[in-house]
């Protein structure tokens, strides 16, 4: 280990050497440049006075001494971004043929550094080394590809982007070299494919271009070929420290089961239990984006492997979790759970009785909702009373508390209890989740039969609710879902219930809260498109002619506005998708 002062002296020399190296090709101008800038030391003046041959000879000696210095450095505080940029500048100027294998020892050490700037810079250094490779000499490229793979899985976007550039540089060398291509593909293809969905736009676009460059139109076939490596990497990303990476992992699984698995179901069948087990373990993720993605992915798996999923030993727990999260705090998670339940119903899972019982019990719970009390300012959080917690815990013996904790941990491992970050569900949230569920099972209304029709008659009651603040969110979902229910259920099947929705629709269409006003107006216009303006007008007139003026106003507004106007920002999108 070198001391701090000695280290700073060496770094100072290295900084000077960067300028020295960059000007080697122009020896006649070098002495004048050096005299006017950094190099005032006698060492450099002597070096320059010996002429070009002497310069190059001493230059190579300096390079080796630099790497001997770095071999002595085993502490991350001494290996930083600036140091690595110096090494990169040396390699860019002089090549690598005169540098010993110590450079690879530096790479091995820095790839695992805790400093993300070091991890980023080491990927840039690898790019410089790759520029010195050629197709006739690819020795060691597999090891470099392994280090690039680490960068492509990094939690920091900057590191991933540098690694993405290095990955493309690798394929520019090995794209047509079969001896190395198969080995490199196993390491880099799953990671490049994953980063095509990454949340950072630059990384996403860059990897999409790289994917086209290396795969052409054979991407799906290569994913089938590398199914083991792809699943292994996607599973590892489900447990990343970065919640956005976990979310992207669910999106990548969606892509596999929507676009790739249907081409060859056998390719991913051996990994189903492993994938499902990992997905279920993420239901307790504190980030709603991940929970939403997990439920959607389970539904997409069911759409391809329905028979295999019916035999899955944890299917009862999966269904339990889906029903449980129909009333959770975040609307998009409620929606995702309902979508998956609808997919399971459509694939022949025995859910008819459970679905109808759930809807009968929870659809109209919002009618009992009282105005909400002030809660914690943390979104979707709960207000934790410390004194109450102290008092309740003090009344328990140590043995009882240990037993309670063990039972809680066991239940959490089985994914059957609240992981602790959700507040208790409000009554209106049960109704909101039930509306989503009604929308999804309307696609399979023949399976539900008359029970669906009876439940449909209850929906208008929710359009009259105003006693709590969140009623606007409930009615927004109600009328957005009704648009889809009409289209799914069918024109003639919905006609007997049309009059039931007239009054709640026009009441809500005049609401001063835009988030529910415009969905109600959209619902009215859907009726016009499905049944015709004259029929809808006649129905309104027979029900209550007082609404004819409101109906005419909606028609005129629709005719005058551009198709994209008249929509509040975020229409039909309560949360980012």
Image (cartoon, rainbow, N blue to C red):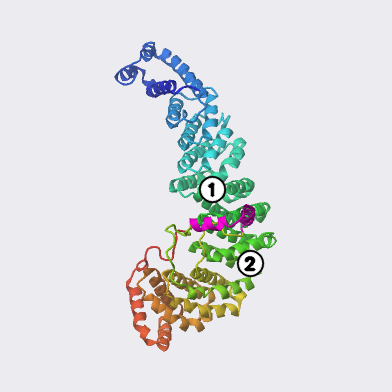
Where does the image place residue 184, in percent across and percent down from the top left?
58, 38
Kindly state the secondary structure of the residue where label 1 is placed: helix
Classify mark 1: residues with Cα within 10 Å, few (<14), some (14-19) or many (20+).
Answer: many
In the picture provided, is 171 more to the left or to the right than 305? left
Whether residue 395 appears in magenta in the rendering, the answer is: yes
Q: Nearer the viewer, residue 253 or 385?
A: 385
Residue 18 location (% of width, % of height)? 40, 24
Mark 2 crowd level (few <14, some 14–19, many ≥20, 10 Å Cα): some
143, above or below 386, in the image: above
Q: Earlier in the sequence, mark 1 or mark 2?
A: 1
Check disc 2 and report the residue beneath it: 347
Of 521 and 399, which appears nearest the observer? 399
Question: Which residue does the image show at 52% across and 57% down from the upper left?
Answer: 389
The local secondary structure at tag 2 comes to loop
The x and y percentages for residue 110 are: 51, 32
Q: Is residue 508 left or right of residue 172?
A: left
The residue at which mark 1 appears reads as 194
Q: CA distance from mark 1 to mark 2?
A: 29 Å
Question: Does 439 lie within the magenta span?
Answer: no
Horizontal side of 393 relative to 269 (left or right) equals left
Q: Is residue 181 visible?
A: yes
Q: Position of residue 157 (x, y in %)?
A: 46, 43
From this view, report whether residue 45 is shown above or below residue 547: above
The answer to whether residue 134 is visible is: no
Overall secondary structure of the magenta stretch? helix
Q: Which span of residues is magenta-colored?
A: 386-415
Considering every residue shown, the one lying at the far left of the view is: 36
**Residue furthest bottom in the image:** 542
Q: Nearer the viewer, residue 66 or 76?
A: 76
For the image, the number of numbered tags is 2
């Amino acid at each position: 280990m070198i001391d701090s002062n000695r280290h700073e002296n060496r770094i100072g020399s290295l900084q000077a050497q960067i300028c020295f190296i960059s000007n080697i090709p122009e020896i006649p101008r070098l002495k004048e440049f050096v005299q006017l800038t950094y190099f005032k030391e006698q060492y450099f003046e002597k070096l320059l006075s010996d002429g070009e041959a002497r310069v190059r000879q001493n230059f190579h000696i300096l390079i080796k001494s630099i790497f001997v210095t770095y071999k002595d450095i085993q502490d991350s505080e001494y290996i930083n971004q600036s140091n690595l940029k110096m090494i990169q500048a040396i390699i860019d100027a002089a090549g690598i043929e005169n540098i010993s294998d110590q450079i690879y020892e530096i790479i091995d050490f820095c790839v695992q550094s805790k400093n993300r700037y070091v991890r980023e810079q080491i990927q840039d250094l690898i790019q410089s080394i790759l520029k010195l490779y050629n197709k006739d000499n690819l020795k060691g490229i597999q090891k470099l590809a392994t280090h690039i793979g680490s960068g492509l899985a990094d939690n920091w976007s900057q590191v991933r982007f540098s690694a993405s550039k290095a990955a493309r540089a690798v394929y520019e060398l090995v794209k047509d070299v079969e001896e190395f291509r198969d080995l490199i593909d196993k390491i880099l293809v799953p990671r490049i494919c994953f980063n095509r969905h990454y949340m950072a736009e630059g990384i996403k676009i860059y990897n999409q271009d790289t994917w086209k460059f290396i795969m052409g139109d054979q991407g799906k076939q290569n994913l089938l070929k590398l199914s083991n490596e792809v699943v292994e990497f996607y599973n590892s990303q489900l447990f990343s420290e970065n919640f956005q990476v976990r979310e992207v992992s669910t999106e990548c699984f969606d892509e596999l089961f929507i676009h790739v698995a249907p081409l060859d179901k056998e390719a991913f069948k051996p990994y189903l239990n492993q994938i499902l087990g990992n997905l279920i373990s993420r239901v307790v993720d504190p980030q709603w984006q991940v929970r939403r993605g997990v439920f959607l992915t389970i539904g997409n798996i069911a759409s391809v492997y329905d028979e295999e999923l019916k035999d899955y030993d944890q299917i009862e727990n999966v269904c339990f979790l889906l029903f449980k999260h129909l009333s959770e705090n975040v609307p998009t998670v409620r929606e995702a759970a309902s979508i998956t339940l609808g997919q399971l119903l459509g694939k022949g899972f025995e859910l008819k009785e459970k679905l109808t019982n759930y809807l009968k019990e929870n659809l109209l719970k919002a009618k009992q909702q009282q105005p909400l009390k002030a809660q914690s300012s943390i979104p979707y959080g709960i207000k934790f009373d410390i004194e109450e917690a102290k008092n309740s815990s003090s009344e328990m013996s140590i043995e009882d508390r240990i037993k309670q904790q063990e039972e809680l941990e066991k239940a959490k491992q089985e994914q059957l209890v609240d992981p602790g970050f959700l507040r208790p569900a409000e009554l209106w949230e049960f109704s909101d989740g039930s509306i989503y569920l009604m929308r999804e099972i309307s696609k399979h209304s023949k399976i539900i039969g008359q029970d669906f029709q009876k439940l449909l008659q209850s929906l208008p009651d929710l359009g009259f609710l105003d006693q709590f603040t969140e009623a606007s969110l409930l009615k927004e979902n109600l009328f957005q879902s009704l648009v889809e229910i009409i289209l799914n259920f069918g024109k003639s099947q919905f006609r007997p219930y049309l009059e039931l929705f007239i009054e709640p629709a026009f009441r809500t269409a005049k609401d001063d809260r835009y988030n529910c006003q415009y969905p109600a107006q959209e619902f009215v216009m859907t009726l016009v498109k499905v049944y015709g303006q004259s029929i809808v007008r006649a129905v309104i007139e027979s029900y209550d002619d007082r609404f004819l003026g409101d109906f005419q106003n909606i028609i005129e507004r629709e005719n005058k506005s551009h198709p994209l106007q008249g929509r509040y920002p975020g229409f039909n999108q309560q949360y980012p998708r």
